[in-house]
Amino acid sequence: MATPLIACAIAICLWLAHRAIRRKSGLPYPPGPKGLPLVGNTFNINLKEPHLTYTEWGKTYGDIMYCHIFGQDFVIINSEKTARLLADQRSSIYSNRPQSPLYRIFGANHMTPILQYGGEWKTQRKILHLSLRHDVVNRYYDLHLDNARRLLENMQNDSENFVDHLNLYAACTALEFAYGRRMQGKDDPIVTLAAGIAHTLTTRMTSERTGLLMALPILEYLPSWFPGAGFKDDARRCREMIAAISERPFAMAKQYIGSSGTQYSLVSDILTHGGVEESDAKEMTLQQGA
């Protein structure tokens, strides 16, 4: 019994020593709230709405601040001006993205905004360019106009739920662009699935959970009822929704290619001019549409 405890104590001491050496050897971090040993600022953050915590911290620590969660370091930008300076004018330094097993667990590891700068990211950008070039975007004018009209009608009929109407407008526009199929409002099964995926990814795949899993990768292999591993149920449901949305709309879009009256779509552009395998095209379209 004593041997495992001694081993754990040694491992923790080595980990703390490693962090202390790493901090001393590099540049100092921006100011930020002091954290507890091991867990850092984990218990100081509102995990459901972390932006509220960051906004409050910004009043004390400024536009750029630092915190750490279970050994993972986070630099938080609390100002649009500073974010634009770093992202636009210094993009060669800050254009990459951190990786986490959480992306793979939720089935989102191939989405363009999450990909690291490299071959796959460049391929997806190239494919998107087929449908978003300045000389072809005008063919989606009617798509945007129709959805804008539906948005105005919905807001006129029910002005209190304007946020829901805006979300529906964005979902229908993206899905119709991806698959070339007119969506039938909020009750359309494809819209429902896409909204479920977006909600799960934005509310469950948070940066705090990402950092936690990066610091404690063993959580991936623990049962979902174990404290801290409850995200695995959300991830399973997300993967099921992604599997459900990946087949039918793509097959329908492929079937309609070349038929009269069919809308232009990302699917038709990829299959006609993209030069990629159908399985890759299906996954790529799913990532953009969802």
Image (spheres, rainbow, N blue to C red):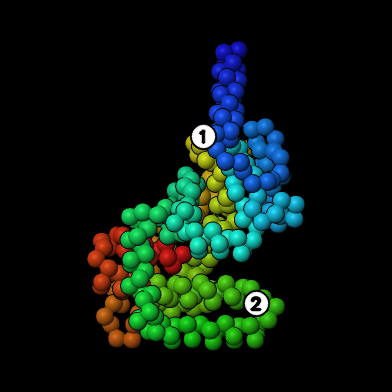
Identify the mark at residue 218; answer none if there is no mark: 1
| Circle 2 Cα neighbour tier, 10 Å, few/some/many (<14 / 14–19 / ≥20) | some
Residue 263 % position (x, y)? 36, 81
Q: Badge 2 is on which residue?
A: 162
Identify the mark at residue 17; answer none if there is no mark: none
**Residue type beneath disc 2:** Phe
* 9 versus 34 height, above or below: above
Q: Foreground residue, 2 or 114? A: 114
Q: Is residue 240 visible?
A: no
Compared across the picture, whether 110 is left or right of 169 comes to left
Image quarter in which the N terminus is found: top right
Q: Quadrant of the rendered structure where residue 285 is?
A: bottom left
Q: Secondary structure at mark 1?
A: helix
* 145 versus 26 height, above or below: below
Q: Foreground residue, 214 or 64? A: 64
**Residue type beneath disc 1:** Ile
Q: Quadrant of the rendered structure where residue 265 is?
A: bottom left
Compared across the picture, whether 224 is left or right of 56 comes to left
Residue 267 % position (x, y)? 33, 71
